[in-house]
Amino acid sequence: MNTQESRVRLEVSLAKLRHNFETIAERVTPAGVVAVLKANAYGLGVRPIAKLLAGCGAAGFGVAEVNEALELTGLGLPVRILGNLLPGEIEAAVANDIICPVCDLEGAERLNAEAARQNKNIRIQIAVDTGMGRLGFRYETALPQILKLKTYSNLTPFGIFSHCPVAYSKYDSFTALQIERFKQLIASLQENGMTFVERHMAASDAINNFPASTLAPFNMVRTGINLYGYCDNEVAHTMDLQGVVELKTRLAAVRKLPAEATIGYGRTYKLRKNTIVGTIAAGYADGLPLALSNRGYVLINGKFCPILGRLSMDYTTVLLDEVPEAKCGDEVVCIGTQGENSILLEEWAQLKGTHAYELLCSFGSRVKRIYV
């Protein structure tokens, strides 16, 4: 079967990805860096991203669930599940030597039983809820429960971790309290003879805003969104990170429409005069947010071209007043740089009232990932 160039292309800069990893690693040294590659590396394609980061010195990979973990075995680095294991996932996790999370004693019992059945000893990392309210041993009662894990003969306590819900706010007192809670728990466990190879709390936001979460007793950090050059909307960029993606398509048509013609579903835009408009070969199925309707821009021949009307699933109409020379097949930049102008992913996020995480994960399956 012959294949054609994809109408919509997501170009991922491996050079910028390497730069971001090295910048983060320098910021947190001597702590190691676990690269978080959840959701297909935030939609960018997990295997090429993982291979590059393995070569950069990543301490390992973090994922959300067992199928994601299985995609990363064979690269020579440890893989950690950062959420929880469902009962039906335990067998595969044990069989493939994944570093398994333990969030409660019931889960530990299931994991230990399966490890015994397979005649294996499994490394575990213990999740502690210091205030996220999502998963893990609650910090108030964690000490005796975690100490009990020493009695499970087929489990080896390898790591301990926690997570912050408001670390994007630089002066958040609750995050500072969480850090102290976790440090006290680690110290108490050590006093009772329980130590860990890995101790981590900082994810991307805390790396930016809370240096204490990257220092002893912590010796590891987790980073996902920062790898790709983006932050939570409220985070002040404190590192020189570079956005790694550019989203490109092409003009599918150039047309001259009369005054009073309306554009798109709902007829939400009416032309005031005879106008040259273009239709680009990308829509919301490709990841363009509907919030760009009548508000966003694309770049054609280096000029900003406003979006007219409501986006469709496969096409979007734009005004070509600034580029009357444009023709069918011309390149269109939806995110990225063309000439002297740029459109940032963060600008899309502001228009949609969301953050870069969601937008990175929303690029459709027919969008070709290209690594440059």
Image (spheres, rainbow, N blue to C red):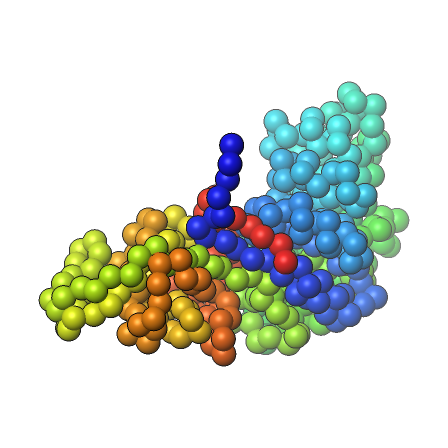
| Quarter location, residue 64 | top right
Is residue 89 positioned above or below 198 on the image? above
Q: The C terminus appears in which quarter of the rendering?
A: bottom right
Is residue 249 positioned above or below 230 on the image? above
The image position of residue 74, as x and y in percent, is: 77, 38
Closest to the observer: 79 or 90?
A: 79
Residue lying furthest right in this view?
193
The image position of residue 354, as x and y in percent, is: 43, 62
Tell me what residue is drawn at x 44 percent, y 62 percent: 331
Is residue 111 positioned above or below 323 on the image? above
Tell me what residue is drawn at x 44 percent, y 57 percent: 249
Q: Is residue 215 left or right of residue 253?
A: right
The image position of residue 210, as x and y in percent, is: 67, 71
The image position of residue 343, as x and y in percent, is: 46, 70
Is residue 148 positioned above or below 54 on the image? above
Closest to the observer: 61 or 207?
A: 61
Q: Is residue 79 left or right of residue 347?
A: right
| Quarter location, residue 27 | bottom right
Tell me what residue is drawn at x 61 percent, y 69 percent: 242
Residue lying furthest bottom in this view?
340
Residue 289 visible here: no
Residue 287 visible here: yes
Closest to the observer: 74 or 176?
A: 74
